[in-house]
Amino acid sequence: AQSVTQPDIHITVSEGASLELRCNYSYGATPYLFWYVQSPGQGLQLLLKYFSGDTLVQGIKGFEAEFKRSQSSFNLRKPSVHWSDAAEYFCAVGATSDYKLSFGAGTTVTVRA
Amino acid sequence: GAVVSQHPSWVICKSGTSVKIECRSLDFQATTMFWYRQFPKQSLMLMATSNEGSKATYEQGVEKDKFLINHASLTLSTLTVTSAHPEDSSFYICSAPNRGQYNNEQFFGPGTRLTVL
């Protein structure tokens, strides 16, 4: 069974500073990996995904993530955060066989002026 | 794009009543849909897999008789919370994989906020 660990429960960053959210996964085969963002009371928006190929993935809103098989990681980065980036971020791993997703516990990002 | 809708977006009901939540794929067909539950400030927990034309598959610990799932067509799945109690209050989210051009990427509905009084 697959699982995801997001070690950071809450991160506070200054507007304009860089952001990195950590994600470690456990899966027996090549995983499908995703990062989603959720604003309060809203559904999930896909930021980016990794299925195969280039291990550095570009997403929306200036986000990118790097798949590192040796470290079982898929960390999310943004060079310069905006106040609108304050939200909950979820990393997820998907099974290639049945499309089920397992989500990490989430990381809350607070952006200070 | 691929869009998934949910109805209603929020519902308040009395304890002991049943509530039906709909999940629709608007511009693609979905033989499989997933139902998640999210408690405040927690992650999404998969409840069940909805299968068109067959019974739903429930995750361990999820009561089948309490959370009835019907995948009526290739674009509609419904979740009925039967005899709802305050502890069932939660945010329910559905998703559907688009097996066409989106390489099985899952698309999520906006969620339904259920409050049981």
Image (cartoon, rainbow, N blue to C red):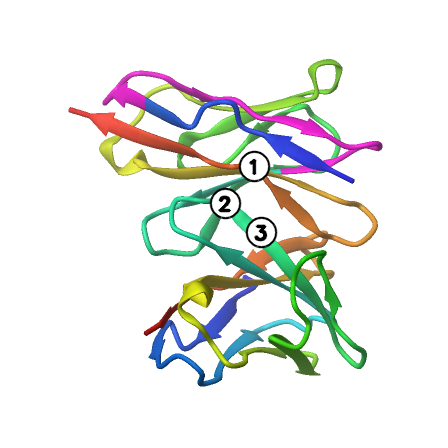
Observer-nearest residue: A102 or B97? Answer: A102
Question: Can you tell which mark lies on residue A104?
Answer: 1
Q: Which chain does the numbered disc 3 sit on?
A: B
Classify residue A28 as left or right of residue B95. Answer: right
| 3 and 1 marks in contact (CB < 8 Å) | no
Q: Is residue A108 above or below residue B27?
A: above
Residue at the disc numbered 3: B45
Q: Which chain does the numbered disc 2 sit on?
A: B
Report, in whole angstroms, how far the alpha carbon at label 3 lies from the one at label 1: 10 Å
Q: Residue at x 68, y 72 (%)?
A: B64
- Tell me where the magenta segment starts and ends, as one range: A12-33
Q: Secondary structure at mark 1?
A: loop
Q: Secondary structure at mark 2?
A: loop
Name the amino acid type tagged 2. Answer: Ser
Quarter of the figure with residue B94: bottom right
Whether labels 3 and 1 share one chain = no
Name the amino acid type tagged 3. Answer: Met
Whether labels 1 and 2 share one chain = no
Residue B63 spot, x, y in % from top left:
65, 68
Residue at the disc numbered 2: B43
